[in-house]
Amino acid sequence: MTRLVQRANEYRRRHGLLALPRELCLRTYRRLFQNWHYVFACDEPPALCTPPTGLRLLHCREPHGLPDAYREQIVRELSVAMNATLNHDFANRAELFVALDGDQVAAIQWVRFGCHVRSWFVPLRADDFVLFGGTTLPRFRRRGIMTWMIVDQTRYALQRGGRGHSDVKVWNTPAIRAVECAGYRRIACLRPLRAEP
Ligand SMILES: CC(C)(COP(=O)(O)OP(=O)(O)OC[C@H]1O[C@@H](n2cnc3c(N)ncnc32)[C@H](O)[C@@H]1OP(=O)(O)O)[C@@H](O)C(=O)NCCC(=O)NCCS
């Protein structure tokens, strides 16, 4: 309950009081009636083109690989809950990719291999992997950054010989477009067992 109030307060601070009731209704509606995920798989992504706007990538396997300045920016621009999320995902053996535009974080995405996933939408082998938590910071959106990230991280993880997977909520059109443009195909539409891989 406290967490819900904190999140509502944070939303109000970022988007204004008038936007809050609409967001609460939308979230409740989605939770009750649209709580389905498209499950995607990929064996062969398209060729990797040049990164948009000269981005460079940081690959962090452990929390101390992520400089404090970047962590602070992620938390400030996305949500205070990101601090706990980052700790949780590193602790559960996920690898973080951070796209940087100069000294600014433009996007983040996680990769976790099947050997570190307890249960997911479909069975995973040890070298299969899941891309999750892909987020482009709001001021960098609609520049092709996430599509490029998905292709890049899929090509990285496929080197172990497995198959790529991802899941997206059925209402999340931008994420569905990004995953499909990056060469993933829809294999199922399922309700989640757990919130994350
Ligand atoms: C989903 C998200 C990561 C997309 O990031 P992005 O860097 O803007 O994505 P891209 O620029 O690569 O765009 C990917 C596709 O989505 C489309 N798209 C992007 N934003 C859109 C929007 N608001 N409405 C409709 N389509 C949109 C783009 O046009 C593009 O499709 P196209 O190649 O056919 O034109 C970003 O919107 C985001 O961070 N959302 C919040 C977090 C989230 O939902 N993450 C997904 C978790 S699974």
Image (cartoon, rainbow, N blue to C red):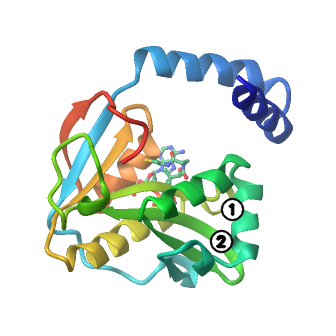
The reply to whether callout 2 and callout 1 are in contact (CB within 8 Å) is yes
Q: With respect to residue 37, does 176 lie above or below? A: below
Identify the residue at horizontal 37%, vertical 42% (top origin).
Answer: 168
Sequence-first tag of 2 and 1? 1
Label 1: few (<14), some or many (≥20) within 10 Å? many
Identify the residue at horizontal 42%, vertical 64% (top origin).
Answer: 94
Residue type highlighted by circle 1: Ile
Classify mark 2: helix, strand or loop: strand
Identify the residue at horizontal 33%, vertical 34% (top origin).
Answer: 37
Q: How far apart are marks 2 and 1 (CA)?
A: 7 Å
Identify the residue at horizontal 64%, vertical 79% (top origin).
Answer: 101
In this figure, which residue is indicated by the disc labeled 2? 105
Q: Where is residue 131 in the image (x, y as percent from the top left)?
A: 36, 59
**Left or right of 162, for residue 91:** right
Tag count in the figure? 2
Q: In which quarter of the image is residue 104?
A: bottom right
Residue type highlighted by circle 2: Val
* Nearer to us in this view, 155 or 146: 155
Q: Position of residue 108 (x, y in %)?
A: 54, 65
Q: With respect to residue 62, does 102 lie above or below? A: below
In this figure, which residue is indicated by the disc labeled 1? 74
Q: Position of residue 145 (x, y in %)?
A: 50, 67
Q: In which quarter of the image is residue 26?
A: top right
Looking at the rendered image, the disc whose residue lies closer to the viewer, 2 or 1, is 1
